[in-house]
Amino acid sequence: MLEIKYAILGAGLAGLSTAYHLGGDCMVFEKTDRVGGLAYSEETDDFILDYCVHVLYHNNPDIRELCDNLLNGNTKDHVRSTWIYSKDVFTQYPFQANLYGLPLDVVEECILAFIDAKYSEKKAGKNRNFAQWIENTFGAGIAKHFMFPFNEKLWTVHPKKMSTEWVESVVPQPEIEDIIDGALPGQKRLFGYNATFRYPQTGGIKVIPDTLSKRIAPIKFKHEAVKIDPVKKLVHLKNINETVHYDVLISTLPLKYMPEMITGVPDTVLSACDKLIHNSVECVNVAVDRPVDMNRHWIYYPEPEYIFYRVMLPHTMSESMVPEGKGAFSVEVSHGNDRKIDFPKIEEDVIRDLKKVHLMESDEEPKFIQRLSIPCAYSIYTNERVSSISKIKAYLTEHDIHSIGRYGNWEYSNMEKALNDGREIADYLKGDAG
Ligand SMILES: Cc1cc2nc3c(=O)[nH]c(=O)nc-3n(C[C@H](O)[C@H](O)[C@H](O)COP(=O)(O)OP(=O)(O)OC[C@H]3O[C@@H](n4cnc5c(N)ncnc54)[C@H](O)[C@@H]3O)c2cc1C
């Protein structure tokens, strides 16, 4: 039997970063035959296409430095150019700070309702869910014309079913001056956590995990963890029918599902897992036989008549993503919970709607369509999320199992956070060992 001090499940950014920062005494077990998890780029016919938008933004100087080192100059800074297409016009993101260009009655409705919400006494203490937070923060106009339809499409549940602990850091909240300024023509202020970002010049986002993986011990690919004995500290790996003994297990697998593989896990933990919910995203990459003549990084589609909520234009990330004279669209469709889509028809519906929004010509045929599925895409923030996570994690930690990463923490977080999770757990374990 293989004896490992630190066994790491998953070779996404969190797992790779854990191994890198531990520096030894560890082994990464990955169910697929490649690294990167969601931070990956598929190469097809000289196109390099990611799992939807995957751009790098930094808040953490140590992880910025790590990425600088991994990219080794292969990076380009971008000022975000993101747009919203609704009412048949493009307006800049975020909707609430860029009303200019919308029909005048919509602009008026949004501004008046914003003022009413901002200065109304009614709202005090009433942010019990995301829907109320939206109405109290932006007013009924912005809620109706963007916030409700967009969020319902993305999250697959109505905002009234969601909690609010995540919103302050994610949803830009412009002041009244910004809303008025944004309703008038002229240069606008940029809002949001990813107003500037960077992206590899060549190779797609997978350059980061690829380079990181070369700095750690060889990874055990096609080693899918299927069973964990937390008392004997054994993990069973399916494809090779091997069992590994560990001292500490670091899991980057989804917190909702990982405990199912633990022998003797209490029912209270499993019922906490049942309370965690998520959506799924189908990334439909559509290649076309001509250049795409538009310099917008990505576009949001709030209206229900379009199947997708966002379309990214890969050539804007880096010219090397698409061969000369060709183009592509990276289309995101969410589903699950209350949002049912006609799954077998998804490609047909994506092409139909790319034509409806004038990104494709009415008689145009795609060069190829590539489907990348993300079954567990966004953890949905509900009132039961925090207490469920703490119940599950308390049980895991008691058994020397540390659950990290976007899905291991069951959170809305980015690549930088996944890299930092790996660094923090490694520091913690090394500190413990010392
Ligand atoms: C639609 C979408 C867009 C995003 N856009 C951005 C963005 O623009 N910028 C940004 O910074 N972040 C973005 N993110 C977030 C980013 O993808 C994640 O934060 C990050 O990649 C998570 O890394 P991870 O290692 O925690 O998880 P993962 O990438 O999910 O890695 C987990 C790994 O575990 C493996 N695994 C699963 N089950 C088993 C098993 N039983 N045994 C062994 N291995 C297993 C998987 O194959 C995978 O390799 C986006 C996410 C989504 C869904």
Image: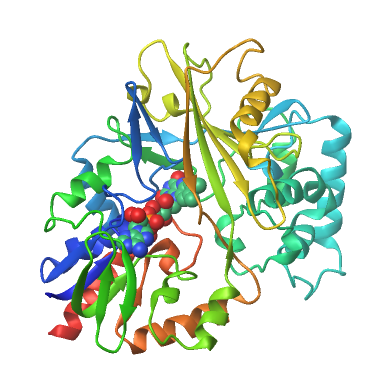
- Identity of the residue drawn at 18% across and 78% down: 245
Name the image quarter holding residue 298: top right
Check the image and report above or below for 302 versus 89: below
- Identity of the residue drawn at 67% across and 53% down: 156
Please state, as top left, top right, bottom left or bottom right, where the N terminus lies in the image: bottom left
Q: Is residue 225 left or right of residue 377?
A: left
Judge whether residue 416 can be spotted in this image: no
**Front residue of this view, candidates 267 and 411:** 267
Residue 213, given in percent of the width and then of the height, sits at: 19, 51
Q: Quadrant of ligand 1?
A: bottom left
Q: Residue furthest front?
A: 241
- Identity of the residue drawn at 78% across and 51% down: 143
Please state, as top left, top right, bottom left or bottom right, where the C terminus lies in the image: bottom left
Judge whether residue 307 can be spotted in this image: yes
**Front residue of this view, candidates 414 and 248:** 248
- Identity of the residue drawn at 25% across and 83% down: 233
Residue 100, given in percent of the width and then of the height, sits at: 73, 32
Name the image quarter holding residue 187: top right
**Front residue of this view, candidates 31 and 23:** 31
Check the image and report above or below for 359 versus 311: above
Check the image and report above or below for 91 versus 293: below
Q: Is residue 104 left or right of residue 169?
A: right
Q: Is residue 336 left or right of residue 248?
A: right
Residue 219, given in percent of the width and then of the height, sits at: 18, 56
Residue 397, given in percent of the width and then of the height, sits at: 35, 84
